[in-house]
Image (cartoon, grey):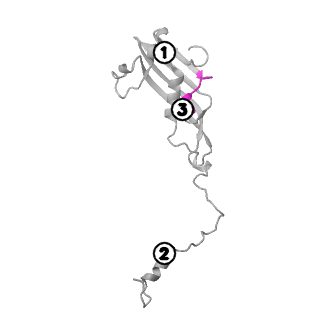
Amino acid sequence: MHGNGLPHRVDIARLGEGEHSWAGALAGCPLPRMDALDARVGDVSATLTLTIDRGRPRLQGNCSAVVTLVCERCLAPVALDTAGAFDLVVVDRIEEADGYGADQPVVVAPKGQLDIAALIEDELILALPVIPTHDDADCDGGQRQFGPAGEAAPARDNPFQALESLKRDDSGEVH
């Protein structure tokens, strides 16, 4: 286990073979893509295990945070417990990713520099719901009524009423 908290970056080249673990909070690190989603992110906690076996790094872990978004039904803030788990092969270049199948996710760490903060931000974004909403019992978004309750809509004149008289013949029947 390495130090307190999570590093924002890891230099894989400086780590030796074996297993390296971190656990804690990702503090003081901006998450610009979450900001672009108008999401307020609470404390981000994560556990990471980087295993280097014969020069091939693999990163496993999980992350969680409370993310506040706008409810799409009532437009009020909604706090969502968000969590993601991952098992990734670490590669230096995107071209190396082609050597792995579609069922094996990879993360690119250029020159051995793994951006932990960006990786955790990716996982949290992937864990967000497509349409953020409160639970049905907590949201009045679908139950809104406009105007005084119980009042019927006023009757309006039919704009085609004048044309109806043209359709009547002398007997008063409508054709």
**Furthest-bottom residue in this view:** 171
The amino acid type of the residue labelled 2 equals: Phe
Region of the chain picked out in magenta, as a range: 24-36
122 or 86: which is nearer to us?
122
Distance CA(mark 1)–CA(mark 3): 24 Å
Q: Secondary structure at mark 1?
A: strand
- The structure residue drawn at horizontal position 54% and vertical position 42%, both measured from the top left corner, is 132
Q: Amino acid at mark 3?
A: Ala
At 60% from the left and 50% from the top, the residue drawn is 137
Instruction: Residue 108: give x, y in percent of width and height.
Output: 43, 20
Tag 2 residue: 160
Q: Please state the horizontal and vertical placement of residue 12, each as a whole percent of the image.
A: 48, 13
Tell me which residue sits at (58%, 46%) in the image. 135
The image shows residue 29 at horizontal and vertical percentages of 59, 23
Q: Which residue is mark 3?
A: 83
Residue ID for mark 1: 113
Q: Nearer the viewer, mark 2 or mark 3?
A: 2
Q: Is residue 69 above or below residue 170?
A: above
Residue at (44% x, 82% y) in the render: 166
N-term mark: 1 or 3:
3
**Disc 2 element:** loop
- Residue 160, compared with residue 16, is above or below; it is below
Disc 2/disc 3 C-alpha distance (Å): 60 Å
Q: Is residue 98 left or right of residue 6?
A: left
* 78 with respect to 130 (left or right): right
Pointer 1: residues within 10 angstroms few (<14), some, or many (20+)?
some
